[in-house]
Image (cartoon, rainbow, N blue to C red):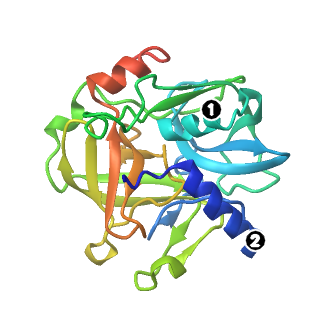
Amino acid sequence: MARVRRLRALVAVALIAAGLAAAPPAAGITFGNPDGNDHPYVGALVANFNGTNFLLCSGTMISSTVFLTAGHCTDFLTSQGVDPSDVYVSFDPTFDDSSPLVQAVGYHTNPNYGYKGPNGFADPHDIAVVILGTPVSGLTGQLPTLNQLNSASPGQVYTAVGYGTVRNDKTKGPASLFFDGERRWVDGTMNSLNKAWLRLSENPSTGNGGTCYGDSGGPHFFKGTRVLSSITVTGDTWCRSTDVTYRVDTASARAFLGQYVSLP
């Protein structure tokens, strides 16, 4: 069973977290740094369930109205029958009940999304977009060119950004995870690259950090740029070793994204 950071697991964790503290239910960057306004085009995907807003995933604006996230995030919304009018994005550096929200008018999961079948894990098409009803002014993240990652070398550094479950202690396993809803960033070093996946180290013993539950859909930028390499999808159970991300520079990803934005 893949350790995909699915929303079903996140919601269960979020409900536990909500019972323990007054922090919003979310998950995020490990061994990282508060983001402040360093990446204002990275947002939190929020959905309303029975009158309560839950921070579910992260993502990136790739145009003034198109928010890039993971397919398993929007697939969860579909499975729960969540109407687009109950879906929002917040760009507040720390998400809470008072954070401004931008309402969605639609969300679209890649129609080929899925981990089943003989080639499911080779390319699960785990990518989606949320369409916002009000344009968001300012900078956006930039999509890479076709197969841009193919020229990357082992050791290339990428910057991950996301909201929520934080880990700053490398010795306590699950006891070291906590929620506070703050957007954070951290650098991770490339381990390997294949057809659909970019794998990175998030081992703090080697100076790296990474993502955790609920960072799904959040960006990994080429360090020092706004150019995306991939989006968060999965990793090891306690978010200490390996970050596994879905490439957005492939022909497959671009075929989907090209329906919503102009491609470089």
The furthest residue to the front: 117
> Which comes sooner in the sequence, label 1 or label 2?
2
Q: Nearer the viewer, residue 23 or 153?
A: 23
75 above or below 237? above
Residue type marked 2: Gly
Q: Residue at x 64, y 29 (%)?
A: 137
The furthest residue to the right: 51
| Dot 1 crowding, Cα within 10 Å, few <14, some 14–19, many 20+ | some
Q: Residue at x 85, y 46 (%)?
A: 51
Q: Which mark is residue 249?
A: none
Secondary element under disc 2, as helix, strand or loop, is: helix
Displayed quadrant of residue 252: top left
Give the CA separation, mark 1 to mark 2: 26 Å
* Quadrant holding the C terminus: top left
Q: Nearer the viewer, residue 40 or 211?
A: 211
132 above or below 149? above
Report which residue position mark 2 lands on. 19
Residue 16: percent from the left, percent from the top? 68, 68
Residue 67: percent from the left, percent from the top? 56, 31
Q: Residue at x 35, y 35 (%)?
A: 124
Report which residue position mark 1 lands on. 78
Residue 117: percent from the left, percent from the top? 31, 33
Residue 149 appears anywhere in the view: yes
Displayed quadrant of residue 148: top left
Secondary element under disc 1, as helix, strand or loop, is: helix
Q: Is residue 93 left or right of residue 143?
A: right
Residue 264 appears anywhere in the view: no
Q: Residue at x 31, y 36 (%)?
A: 120
Q: Is residue 17 left or right of residue 48?
A: left
